[in-house]
Amino acid sequence: FNFRFLATGDSYHTISKSFRVGKSTVVGIVPSVATAIWESLVGEYMPVPQESDWRAIAEGFSSKWAFPHCLGAIDGKHITIKAPADSGSLYYNYKGQFSIVLLAVVDANYLFRVVDIGAFGKSSDGGTLSASALGRALRDGTLNLPDDEPLSNGEHLGKVPFVFVGDEAFPLRKHLLRPYPGRAIPADQRIFNFRLSHARRIVENAFGIMAAQFCVYHRVMELSPCNVEKIVQATTILHNFIRWGHQNSPSTTGSADPGTALNAAGRMGSNTASWEALAVREKYREYFNSPCGAVPWQYNQI
């Protein structure tokens, strides 16, 4: 009945009645089975990416979504929960609900490659990233990212970093691009924003696909935050399992346990963009507005 819970979001009481077992039995089994699903599949279906894996992801974004050197689309999803006892406003988010955050990096095929689960709902996406294992690994340079190299036919721009793409809630970093702010911006910046949005929406699509498969996301999860984290872990890894299939599993060169490679961060980072980060965004802007990097349909979108 664990899959019944994930697929329908039925309450423990309803499931216990349907299967003629005690509610306490359901309470004990669902989280433990969710943990077992995660632990048995994560090493094969969500290994920590190595340099070769990052390069394969970048090739996918270049060929499918016209964004070269893209290592993944990043975004946060709020998982609505029942307000935990004595939690104050920690889980209270900007939507007026109580939640924990699923922060995810998604590849060009709508697969979760890195996830961080359990941040307080009150946190912004940028703050969640800064306080996450992924954010610390980005700051420390321990993500095994490929070295900077020229974009295709863009040698005149010099070496350009591989990057993640996110929305305006994220900080601008050397390896993390966000849109240019504002509405009244020049056409070349609007083209950059469109090309970035075209690639970034993949993570939103992945969240939608997962929620359509697992209707537990359609309801408020009346579980403890700890157990909600286990449910989210199970659904993200099952999402990958379903999309990859048994015969087409990903590379397993990475660590079987993301926690060993992406240690939890202990401090928040500043959202102030460095001159280096601004220069990287300018190179991508110039590339997308040049004959070597432009695509015909981008001019119809601005």
Image (spheres, grey):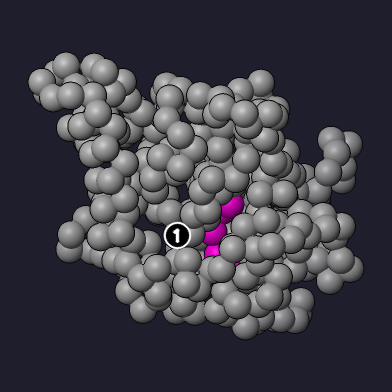
Q: Is residue 282 left or right of residue 258?
A: right
Q: Reply above or below: 2 against 267.
A: above
Q: Is residue 136 left or right of residue 224?
A: right
Boundaries of the magenta span: 69-74
Tell me the crowding category of disc 1: few under 14, some 14 to 19, or many 20 or more residues within 10 angstroms, Cα based: many
Disc 1 marks which residue? Answer: 113
Residue 124: percent from the left, percent from the top?
71, 41
Residue 195: percent from the left, percent from the top?
65, 50
> For the image shown, how many numbered marks are present on the structure?
1
* x 26%, y 37%: residue: 28
Q: Reply above or below: 241 against 94.
A: below
Q: Which is nearer the eye, 76 or 53?
A: 76
Asked if residue 242 can be seen in this view, the reply is yes
Residue 173: percent from the left, percent from the top?
76, 63
Asked if residue 201 can be seen in this view, the reply is no
Tag 1: amino acid: Arg
* x 50%, y 28%: residue: 81
Q: Quadrant of residue 249?
A: bottom left
* x 59%, y 63%: residue: 264
Residue 72: percent from the left, percent from the top?
54, 59
Q: Quadrant location of the C terminus?
A: top right
> Magenta span: helix, strand or loop, mainly?
strand
Q: Reply above or below: 130 against 194.
A: below
The secondary element bearing badge 1 is classed as strand
